[in-house]
Amino acid sequence: MLRTLFRFGKPAFFLILILHLVLLFNLKFTPWPEMLLWPYLILKGWLPYQDIAIAHTPVLLADLAIFGKIFGVGLAQLKVYTWILILATDAIVYFVAKKLWNVKTALLALAFYIPLQIFYDGNGLWFDLALAPLALLIYYCLKKENYLWAGIWWGIAFFTKQTAFWFLFPIFVLLIKGNLFTGLKTFIKGIFFVLVPGFVIFYALGFLPEFLFWAVRFGIGKLPVSLGQIHLPTVRQFFTAAFPLALIILAKVRLGKPSLTLIFWSVFGALGVFPRWELFHFQPALPFVAVALATAAVGFSRFKVSEKAIFLLGLGLFSIVIARQLIRDWRAEDRFFEKDTLAVSAYAKNHTGENEEIFVLNAWDNIYALSETIPATRPWVPHLPWYLELPGVQEGMVADLSETSPNLIVMREYESGVYRPLLINEFISKNYEAEGQIGRYRVLKKK
């Protein structure tokens, strides 16, 4: 049966894509609140960085805003955008593996990539997901010695998320294998083809200083070491997540340098998981892990009997882990769209006018988009201590609340140990009183 599939590469490719889409459609989806709020506010005329505190680079946000301008901003649109991006990554995994290896390796790579992509919290949109296809395109261009396009793709990747920086190390290794001076010069030229126009656009739109503060000084310099941002895994979490890497390291013993290169890219692609451990941060590494596993499967006959047993046992155990997660997430409720979140958003929408200013505190920020309101504080700043404890941030927000005097505040009950911004809470307690309770949320009105 497998030989038949390998013989008919394109039909098998589309069949696997359909399977991936069916799985994504039926599994729990993670619509991170910012992925709705940020394009929603941009389409309302708010400028990123200047009016919205964003610690990430802007390519994904710009693309989402364009998509939202055409199709609207909402959960359904976000799912469609995310699934298109995932299927495009599938196609790139297949294309690259086919061009650099063969159809058999390409189909196996895709077969490995899909369960990995889902297991590492891939059914939801965040910057790391968008970084995955770009990293693979960089690798492909370097292997083909197309250094200019490798630089262009890296520039786009850096403007997608700053952790693209980690790929510079394996990139440099591949450049050394070729003509280092010529390749490096052309690669840098490609980067400048992206970065220079990008900075010119930021300057023309008037938010270059704010971009340099939030995305560079704060996002690169301060955020990774901020109190509360550091979140390390347990020993069990670490070994579970790193298990596929252990399998391809085992395969390297028999398969040599090509596999070693893929391991190198996999490791550096996964470094975005530190300092804040979340499985979705592994997404940029997964195409390389999948291709490495595929090359191991193709070269399986070269393994010793003991190595075959360990490799198959490892795949079997990890398949059980993935299957358990699939069962748990099958037809599960979408994150951040719980019943009480939808209910309080509907309440806010029914008790305000369109584009009316409200304030959401300690709650999901998608409430603004769902209720078709806008924040009463500008710039909008996330309810996170590493933002709100910056000098002058809470003072500025209190000044905005005093001036705009929103009629309605949506506030989620604080749980034990949860961060509370002192100045903002003092202002609210002095000027607002409870009007009602909707699930975990309190609705406040002016006294």
Image (cartoon, rainbow, N blue to C red):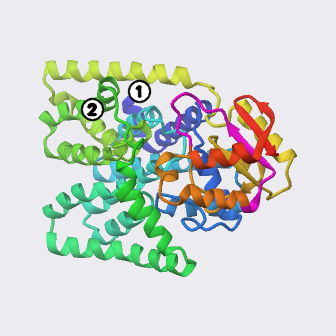
Residue 418 highlighted magenta (yes or no): yes
Q: Nearer the viewer, residue 412 or 23?
A: 412
Above-or-below relation of 296 to 186: above
Q: Residue at x 19, y 28 (%)?
A: 301
Above-or-below relation of 204 to 418: below
Disc 1 designates what residue?
Answer: 1
Q: Residue at x 58, y 29 (%)?
A: 415
Name which residue type carries label 1.
Answer: Met
Disc 2 designates what residue?
Answer: 297
Mark 2 → mark 1, Cα distance in angstroms: 16 Å
Q: Nearer the viewer, residue 314 or 398?
A: 398
The reply, left or right, for residue 385 in relation to residue 270 is right
Q: Residues within 10 Å of mark 1 (few under 14, many from 20)?
A: few
Above-or-below relation of 255 to 81: above
Q: Position of residue 311 (x, y in %)?
A: 24, 24
Q: Quadrant of residue 340?
A: top right
Quadrant in the picture for the N terminus: top left
Q: Which residue in the rendered view is the most extreme toward the front?
A: 430
Q: Residue at x 64, y 50 (%)?
A: 36
The reply, left or right, for residue 312 in relation to residue 95 is left
State whether residue 415 appears in this view.
yes
Q: Position of residue 446 (x, y in %)?
A: 81, 47
Residue stretch rendered in magenta on the structure: 403-420
The reply, left or right, for residue 316 in relation to residue 261 is right
Q: Position of residue 32 (x, y in %)?
A: 58, 44
Q: Nearer the viewer, residue 340 or 139?
A: 340
Q: Secondary structure at mark 1?
A: loop
Q: Residue at x 26, y 34 (%)?
A: 245
Name which residue type carries label 2.
Answer: Ala
Q: Secondary structure at mark 2?
A: helix
Q: Quadrant of residue 18?
A: top right
